[in-house]
Amino acid sequence: MRMLWALLALVSVQAQASNDVTVETFDGRAVGASIFDISNAAFMFKTRLSGGQVAVAAPDWQPYSGTQVYTGTGGTPIELRTQDEDQFTWPGVGAWVSGSDTITLEAFKFNVSSQMEEAIGSVSITGGAIPVYLSIGSFADPLHISYVTFSSDAAFAIDDLTLGIEGIGPGIPEPAAWALMVFGFGAIGASLRYRSRAIMAA
């Protein structure tokens, strides 16, 4: 019976998460901060951002909102990684980007079998002083993203980093999800069978 409630709780969390999208504006972060976790109140899972630093907006990279952005240097990618990559993924990731050169966003998923990251797609956009939105994953094509990189050959910035897609809750990778569901249904079936035999014996 406990397994049934645990499974129902998991389904409930997924249902509640369907409209949750996390947006990091960097305005609440200390200038110069380079590595920090981004969390969502609805989930216990965190996503770590690294590879750049929080800076006050400048003419070369204007913010989409507020007064601060997260800047990266040419040749060094900004990295975003879920802390429990084998248990938690985002269906989509995006940010408002600006810079003098082409900016690329590459997404990866964690392969449970090989225990390694696999590239699942990349998108690029021509930079500029005015921020433009660069994203991967959509409502029609949600992905299981555990790791992304933003990169450029010149200095660039991201702002209003968006994790998630409206209407699609974050989830666990497919192999793990199916394994958990199969185990849960098996345990529920076994407990119901045991209970019915105990009642018949009585």
Image (tube, rainbow, N blue to C red):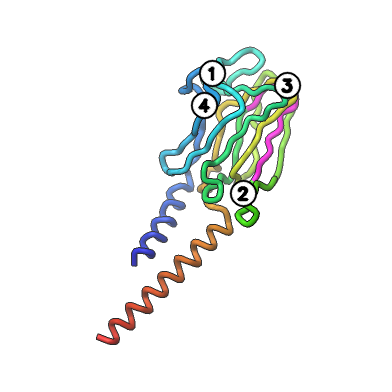
In the figure, residue 150 lies in which quadrant?
A: top right
Residue 13 image position (x, y, % from top left):
42, 51
Question: In the rendered image, which residue does mark 1 sit on?
Answer: 32
Q: Earlier in the sequence, mark 4 or mark 3?
A: 4
Type of amino acid under label 2:
Phe
Give me the C-alpha separation between circle 2 and circle 4. 26 Å
Do residues under tags 3 and 2 come within 8 Å of each other at their CB atoms? Answer: no
Give me the C-alpha separation between circle 4 and circle 3. 22 Å
- Residue 190 appears in the rendering: yes
Please state which of residues 36 and 61 is positioned toward the viewer in this rendering: 36
Give left or right: position of 92 versus 41: right
Type of amino acid under label 1:
Gly
Q: Residue furthest left?
A: 202
Residue drawn at point x = 61 percent, y = 22 percent? 71
Please state which of residues 167 and 185 is positioned toward the viewer in this rendering: 185
Q: Which mark is residue 110?
A: 2
Q: Nearer the viewer, mark 2 or mark 4?
A: 2
Type of amino acid under label 3:
Ala
In the displayed structure, 172 sits above or below 130; it is below
Q: Nearer the viewer, mark 4 or mark 3?
A: 3
Q: Earlier in the sequence, mark 4 or mark 1?
A: 4
Q: Earlier in the sequence, mark 1 or mark 3?
A: 1
Q: Residue furthest front?
A: 115
Q: Residue furthest bottom?
A: 201
